[in-house]
Image (spheres, coloured by chain):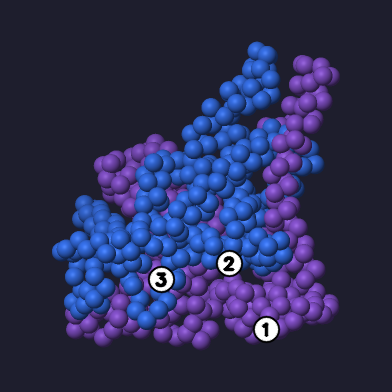
Chain colours: A blue, B purple
Amino acid sequence: MRRKINWGKGVGIGGLILYGIFILFPIYWTFNTSFKEIGDVYKVPPSFVPTRFILDAYRFIFQGTGRIALLNSLVVAAISTAIAVVLGTMASYAYSRYPFTPLTNEGAQFNLLTVRMFPPIAFLLPIFWMWKRFGLLDTYFALIITYTAFNLPLAVWLLKGFMDALPRSIEEASYVDGYSFWQTIRRIVLPLIGSGLAATVALCWIFIWNEFIIAYLLGGRNVILYTAYLPSLRRGMRIMWNQIAALSVLAIIPSIIILVLFRKYLVKIYLRS
Amino acid sequence: MKGLPGLYGKEKDQMLGRAQKKRVVLTPYYLMIPPQFLIWAVVIFPLIWAVYISFHDWNPTISPERTFVGIWNYVTVFRDERFLSALLRMLYYSGVGVTIQLFLGTAIALALVEYVRSERLRTFLLVLFLLPMMMAEAVAAQMWTLLITDTGTINNILVWLGLNPIGWRSRELALTTLMIVDIWQWTALPLLIAYAARISIPESLYESSRLDGASRWLILRKITLPYMRVPLAIAFLLRFMDSYKFLDKVFIMTYGGPGTATELPTFYLYQTAFSYFKVGYGAAMSWIFGIIAVIGMFFFWRLAKVQ
C-alpha cells in the first residue's frame, strides 16, 4: 500500500517537472536567442546560457519598424477594447435585465454568439472587400472597428456573467432612493462589477494584441501590427532569428503581466462557465 | 438565465406605476442600438453580401466582371478534392491533438492539486502552465519554428548528441509537428478548466471516501472524473472549434506545405480567397465553413447538456 502511493507521487511529480520543461523550453530558448549574435544562432553545440548579453537585436527592433508595429498594436488594441467594453456593458446589461424584448431575447443573444463561432477567416473575405470598397483598407479605422466587432461577443459574454451575479434588489433599492437610471448604472452597477470589468478589459485587450490574420489582411503597409510584422522578418537572404526572438520576448511581456494580475479571475471565469 | 427575469417588468410596473413602465420597455432598445449597429455593419451585412457574391464567379485579378453561376460554387466545394482532404487532415489534427490536450491537461491539473501542497508553488506552476495560452499563436509559431527548422535548435542538439536530425517539416511529419505546437500552446485550456472543476469538488467527499477505505484509483474513477465530465466536454468543444478556426500556425510555420501536407480547411480558404482571388468560390466556402462551425457547436452543446 505504502509503496504504491509513493510510486504514484513519483509519477505525478515527475510528470509535472517534465511538463514544466516542455512548456518552459521554447520560451527560454527564445529569450536565450534574443541575446545572441546572428552567427551564434546556428552553432553546434548550441550555447544554452547567454554568456554575453548582446542587445543588437533589441536595438534593431526599437529603432526600426518593430517599434512602430508594437506601438500600433498597443494603440489599436487599447482603443478597440475601450469601445468593445463600453458597448459590451450596454448590451450585457440589456441582456441580463431585460431578456424578453425582441432585441435581447435568447435568439438575439445567440446571434451575437455566432460571431464567435464562425472562423474569423470566413468573415474576412466579405469584410476585406467591404473596406476595400470604401477605400479604408490599411487604416486604423478599419482595424479598430473590425476588432471591436469581433471582440464584442467576448465582452458581452463575460460581462453578462458578472451582471447576472449582481442581485437585482440592489438596483431596485437605488431607484427607490431616487437615483435615475444612469446614476444607478454609474454609481451602483459599474463599481460593483469593477473587478469583473477589469478582467474583461484585460482579456479583450490580449485577444486583439495576439490576433494575427485580421492584422495581416486588413493592415500591412500603413498600419502594421507586430503580429503581421513578425513573418516579414523571416523573408530575405538570412533569417534574423535573434530579431524575431527579441520581438517575441517583447510581445509576450503583456501576456505575462495580465496573466499574473488576473490569475485568480481566469479560474473564476471558467468555473462559472 | 431562467430564474432571473420572469416577474421583473410586471412587478416593477405595479410598484412604480405607468411612468416607469415606458422607460422599462424602452431602455433595452436604447442600449442595444449601438452594439447591434456595429454587428450589423461589420459582420452581418458583409456576410449577406458574401451570400450574393457566392452565387457569382468573380476573380478581380482577371476581370471586374461577375458572372452569375447559381449554386455552382457550393456544388464545386463538395467536389473539390483539396477541400475534402483538408477536412480529413483537420479531423486528424484536431481530433488527435485535442484529445491529447484534454488527457494531458486533466492529468497535469490533477497532479497539481494532488501533489503540490504549497499554495505558492501551485499558483506559480499554474501561471507558468497557462502562459503559452496567453501568447499570440503567431509568436508561439515563430518560437517553435526556430526550434524545428532543419538546422534548428532541436536538430542541433540531436546532432550534438550524435543522433540523426529529424525532418520536422517533412511531408510526413509536418502536420504532427503542428499538432505538437498546438498541444504545447493549448493544453493550458483543458488544464485550467480541469483545475477549476477539481478545486470546486468539496474536499469532504474525499475525506469521507478515504475513511471508507476507498483506493485512490477508485476515488478518481467514482468521484473526480464524474464531477469533471461536463466541464471537460465543454473544454473539448471549445478547443475543437478553436483548432478549426485558427490558421496562424499553419500560415507561419509551414504555409500549408510541403505541397499540401499541412493545408487545413481554413488555410485552404485563405489561399482561395486571398492568394488565388477566387472570391465567389471563397465566399461559398466561407459560408460552408460557418455552417459547419455552427452545426458542430450545436451538436456538442447538446452533448454537453445531456451529459
Question: Marks 2 and 1: in contact by CB < 8 Å?
Answer: no
Mark 2 vs mark 3: which is more N-terminal? Answer: 2
Which quarter of the rendering shows the C terminus of chain A? top right
Query: Which residue lies at the image location 79% right of the left edge and 31% below the top edge?
Result: B26
Q: CA distance from mark 1 to mark 3?
A: 34 Å
Residue B300 image point, x, y percent:
62, 59
State the mark number for residue A217: 2
Residue A124 at what x, y percent from top left? 64, 64
Assess disc 3: are there few (<14), some (14-19) or many (≥20) residues with their C-alpha within 10 Å of its C-alpha: some
Identify the mark at residue B80; answer none if there is no mark.
Answer: 1
Across the whole image, how many numbered discs are drawn on residues?
3
Looking at the picture, which amino acid does disc 3 mark? Leu
Secondary structure of residue under mark 3: loop
Tag shown at residue A233: 3
- Are the residues flagged by discs 2 and 3 in contact, CB closer than 8 Å? no
Which mark lies nearer to you, 1 or 2?
2
Residues at marks 2 and 3 on the same chain: yes
Report the chain holding disc 1: B
Q: Chain of mark 3?
A: A
In the rendered image, the vertical position of residue A195 relative to residue B199, given as above or below: above
